[in-house]
Amino acid sequence: MATAAITADRTNYLNQEYGIKSWLLTTDHKRIALLYLLSITFFFFIGGFFALLIRLELLTPAGDLVQSDTYNKLFTMHGQVMVFFFLIPSIPAVLGNFLVPLMIGARDLAFPRINLLSWYLYIIAGVMMLHCILTGGVDTGWTFYTPFSTAFSNTKVIEAGLAIFVAGFSSILTGLNFVVTIHRMRAPGMTWSRLPLFIWAHYATSIIQLLGTPVLAVTLVLVVLERALHLGIFDPTRGGDPLLFQHLFWFYSHPAVYIMILPSMGVVSEIVPCFCRKRIFGYKFVAMSSIGIAVFGFLVWAHHMFVAGISLYSALIFSILSYMVAVPSAIKVFNWTATMYKGSISFATPMLYAFGFIGLFTMGGLTGLFLAALGIDVHVTDTYFVIAHFHYIMVGGAVMGYLGGMHFWWPKISGRMYPEFWGKLAAMIVFIGFNLTFFPQFVLGYLGMPRRYWQYPPEFQVLNVLSTAGSTILAVGYILPMVYFLWSMRYGKIAEENPWGASGLEWMTSSPPPTFNFDHTPEVTWEAYNYENIPAPEEVAVER
Amino acid sequence: MSDSPIAVEEHNPALRHHFADMEQQRQASSLGMWVFLATEVMFFGGMFCAYLIYRYWYYNEFAAGSRSLDIWLGTINTAVLICSSLTVALGVRAAQMGKRKLLVILLLLTIVFGLAFLGIKGVEWYTKFQEHHIPGSSFNVDDLIKEYPQIRIDPSHQQIFFSLYFAMTGLHALHMIIGVGIFAVLTFYAWKSLYTPEYHTPIELAGLYWHFVDIIWIYLFPLLYLIDRKPLK
Ligand code: HEM
Ligand SMILES: [Cu+2]
């Protein structure tokens, strides 16, 4: 292995042990993070493959590449794979797993074996999902709406439902581990007000995972029971209520969008102070806004159902609450910006991603406010406007944050630096490709192009071609980091303990860290982000 | 690996490497179990929410369905579960005091109570099966319509009640089965003298889980069996 060359004199978590068994039976949170990294990358490319097929079909107005049945399956499996098998586990299970114990000065998560179990559950779920895909797939949309999913669809709904049920438990166990770890395993002196904001973000995320996911789980169980054993809880022919399904589904799935975005916000809160060399502006506000998002996020679910037949009164209330949930998000954006103000900013790759995140997330969030307005929503619901809205947040925001975090902590994870030039290039390509893909979709949606159709009127073609072109550029932007990360594992410059001059305990142990993280349990006597006292490293300074 | 500065005075063999001491380990485990039970509340909460809405909409059918359940078996089962909670609580006490034999006996009793509950539940389900009260194509409630002419029963709405009945008691029973499995393993370890007054966290945690499953039943019993039992005029 390439890593053997790093330090002959020092063992770390990578060269402590070799062999497949030492990986598959490991309880080291850092190794489990890498297991997750491999598996979610795999699913990212599966989901991406479906996305490219969707975009290819939409290159022309006619339905030529695939027919409607296949198209329905493509967008369904794209959504399910991306949401449940990539984005929800992405930052928590990879970066969170790796960093939560390091950042709070612990030797591992509170329950290392449960951590491994959660990975195995993920893999079992993934195999079920793959089997489902390969033997015919599902066509219900990622939302499993009843009664289509329970009574009419003749695709593999049960298998997909059970796969996501199992994946849900993997997610619950990760959240449980984080909550207990953050409560019980902090190093001496690591008080709550000294925690990195990454930790606060993961704490909030875990709360949502713990309280939301079980509701999705039981809802999917009821759908499966209805399909398999003819229970009738959501069956309108027997007086069951399909809207109840939507309520239960969105009770989880709106908060779930915050499972996807909060960890990214945590990453950005680490990157911005580091590359501005300033303490984060308004630490307490950023920390509390994470908790605020987790709480308010549970109170807005019915904004997905404005046209589904809920009463006007409840629609009004949910509309107002949806406006309120934007407040904590905005607080974060303002605080990041204020942190940059008069900071000495260096445009290293992670910072480029952080910039990308802030801009794109803001656009996604603002269009969310459009959608939360009842009148506008009636016009643009179920159009490409909604698609653009959530892709700006989930791809423009969450995936950007994930990539930014991967670059920022790659030296710690692998012990090697990635090539800075290629990193910047890829970040630019991702940004351009992303906007070219999704900005036209705002326009398309506003003009009235509905989502989830395999063909469309010819006047929409120009914008669709732009979008498809953008998606190929985006694909290049995603493949590049894969290539140079792999390359850097052998040829990259050897990383020092703290190449960015960053604050945080994870930078006070060697890169890569030893199996038990710290030689001596650290004792924390300083506040988070004390950049006044940390010298900026030479190389980063040169790059300005 | 003991290059840690927190070299522990007397190293309890049950102490896992990443904890500083037994106290931290115990607190972490117990917090973990409480958090897990919170997720369970949400899990059952989804179904209780559905129950609430449909009972409000279809009260007649819920009342009739409730009358058709065997109140005696339901009551006996409630008593059985409460007894099992007692044996678990006493078991935790026995573990704290290091009484191995007593612990094993109490755990075995818990398993017996748990299995008794499941057996009685099975009988009830089987009766429902014979009465064609299982939702689906062979569903038939003519018997209830004849028996309670005073109540207006819509057979399709009646299916909603029984759908919920089977979903809720079914998922509860699944939790019971898992619980019995856990206690089987714990009994084995207790018999092997794994638990000491210093280390018996698994017994405590399994006890918490078992009490939780009991509490779910304490809610299910009145919600399903006792909706309306007044004599009909
Ligand atoms: C800033 C606050 C936000 C507001 C006010 C908001 C508002 C909305 C509204 C009203 C809809 C429903 C549109 C419709 O179907 O007609 C919607 C859809 C959606 N939003 Fe947001 N949103 C916000 C943030 C987010 C975030 C942070 C994410 C993801 C990380 C997200 C992901 C989604 C998704 C996935 C959908 C579409 C689901 C579907 O129908 O398939 N939103 N949003
Ligand atoms: Cu939402």
Image (cartoon, grey):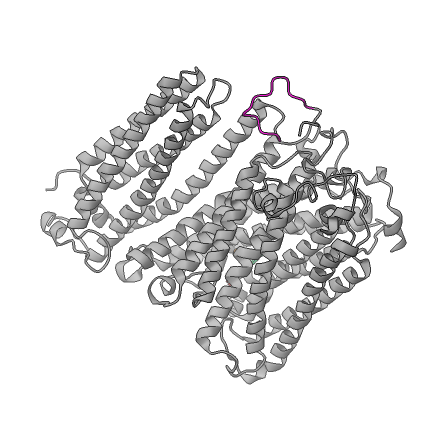
Would residue A207 be seen by someone viewing this image from the given angle? no
Q: Position of residue A291 (x, y in %)?
A: 60, 42
A458 up-or-down from A217: above or below: below
Name which residue lies at 66% across and 50% down. Answer: A265
Q: Is residue A470 left or right of residue B169?
A: right
* Closest to the observer, B61 or A394: A394
Q: Is residue A195 left or right of residue B123?
A: right
Name which residue lies at 31% across and 33% down. Answer: B218
Q: Quadrant of the N terminus of chain B?
A: top right
A405 up-or-down from B42: above or below: below
Q: Position of residue A251 (x, y in %)?
A: 47, 51
Q: Quadrant of the C terminus of chain B?
A: top left
Would residue A505 be seen by someone viewing this image from the given angle? yes
Q: Position of residue A525 (x, y in %)?
A: 76, 29
Q: Is residue B59 left or right of residue A256?
A: left
Name which residue lies at 27% across and 53% down. Answer: B160
Q: Main secondary structure of the magenta part?
A: loop
Residue B8 inside the magenta-drawn segment: yes
* Closest to the observer, A280 or A330: A280
Q: Which residues are magenta?
A: B6-18
